[in-house]
Image (cartoon, rainbow, N blue to C red):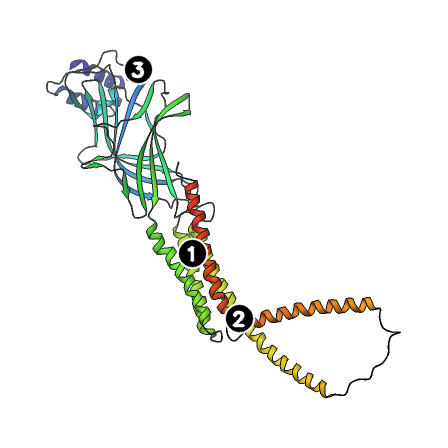
Amino acid sequence: MWTLLVPLLALVASGGGATFGANKALLDCASQILYLEQQTYDIPSDYNRNIPPGKNTTVFIGLNVNRVSGVDENKEFLFPKEITLDVFLQVSWKDPRLKVGLESIDLPWEFRQLIWTPDLYIWQLQTMRILSVLQEMASLRLYKNSTVSVSIGATITIKCEMDFVLYPLDVQTCNIDFSSYKYTSEYVRFEWREVPPWLGWRLAGGQRNQFRLPKYVVSFTTDKSKRIAQYGEGEHSAARLQMTLSRELRGYLLESYLPSSLFVIISWGSFCVIPEIVPGRMVLLVTTLLSLVTMFDTVSTNSPDALELKCIEVWLISCTIFVFLALLEYFVVLFGIRYDKSWCRRRADMRRAASAAQLAPPPLHVNHSQDSPPMMETLGGRAAQGALARVGACIDKGIMFCGAQHGTLDRFALILFPCCFALFNIIYWTTYLSEVQRHPPK
């Protein structure tokens, strides 16, 4: 037991009297080790805490996710989003240089400063705070087979790059990589441990790898493949945990998709209102249009930013266009009614003029063959006038069709608009659902 105090006292003495406060934890550790009852362990006098146990040292990682505290997806556009987790992190490795006489022995947390520990680096880690009640939730245990186990209870914040173009149909995947920032894969390898006591997510009654939040369903899977990252001085081994976030679509369907669809359907009721009732039909269409504009503004403000139009924004803009086209159709009907009334007066005047012309005597025929223009020019002018007359007649018929008192255009629109909206639904959902399948979470 006294051999263990040698490196402790040497480490304290090396700091001098000026650093006594910084080494007070080590003195406390030494005082606790003195009173350990009949527990035998040995640290060689030539033990070097800066040298790993040997080449190909395997470090096993276990992670027990206790709770997903929150997902902050409303960060600024250029910054990664943050996910907060309450976890129990367990790291274990074998160090043959350490000898323990009992099956296992719990040592003070400060003891970690006297032995080799892996320089664990979590790539996506933003912050980490060790939990504490009466003391920090951190333990160090040695086993008889020279296994060292470190367990920590902590709250961690993970950075995650997210793409919200398919919002709210998007499925986000965040990778959490555990690696070493100093030792290459030649010296240290990281793997997931799947047996007790390092089994991740093991609770009474089975495993829990899925958490339900108000907006997300969060699931965790471990990547068993041997991952290698190239940075620094060579290849570094890594153990990856994949976190998948899929949205609860029920809330979005009830809060956005269903109301906007009902607004579009309500706008079709204007086709059944008599065109002459301008206030009733106009209020119905304008109110529906403003409601959709307000809904779009609310959804755009409360949803995360994206490089392009989001999936839900495309839906709301399309619904707004459908209602606007219904309002535009009513403007065409009103113009047609006004033109139809003017045409009726003109037609009555033309009939009176035709009747007067029939009662008048026929004009005398005068031969102007010498002064008349060539025959080809006459025929060309008549053909051009005939074409213009036909175009004008078609325009008149179209305008009168729009302004017919029996609502011909409204009956046509009452069939056309629902068919176009149904076709839009088929194209919209087919396109975006296939896009989700084409770009699964990696």
User: In the rendered view of the protein, which quadrant contains the C terminus?
Assistant: top left
Amino acid of disc 1: Phe
Q: Are marks 2 and 3 in contact (CB under 8 Å)?
A: no
**Residue 90 x/y as whole percent:** 25, 28
Spatial CA span between label 1 and label 2: 28 Å
Residue picked out by circle 1 = 296
Residue drawn at point x = 80 percent, y = 69 percent:
378
Q: Which residue is mark 2?
A: 333
Query: Can you give x and y, in whole percent of width and height, for residue 309 in the image?
Result: 46, 49
Judging from the image, what secondary structure is the residue with disc 1 in? Answer: helix
Distance, label 2 to label 3, CA atoms, is: 87 Å
Q: Is residue 20 visible?
A: no
- Relative to 74, is 45 above or below? above
Q: Quadrant of residue 127?
A: top left
Q: Is residue 173 above or below residue 336?
A: above
Q: Toward the viewer: 17 or 203?
A: 203
**Three-letter code for the amino acid on which mark 3 is drawn:** Gly
Q: Is residue 400 left or right of residue 40?
A: right
Q: Earlier in the sequence, mark 2 or mark 3?
A: 3
Whether residue 237 is visible:
yes
- Mark 1 or mark 2, earlier in chain: 1
Q: Secondary structure at mark 3?
A: loop
Tell me whether circle 1 and circle 2 mark residues in contact (CB < 8 Å). Answer: no
Q: Are marks 3 and 1 in contact (CB under 8 Å)?
A: no
Name the residue rendered at 46%, 69% in the picture.
271
- Circle 3 is placed at which residue position? 54
| Amino acid type shown at disc 2 | Val
Q: How many marks?
A: 3
Q: Where residue 205 sits in the image (x, y, percent)?
A: 18, 37
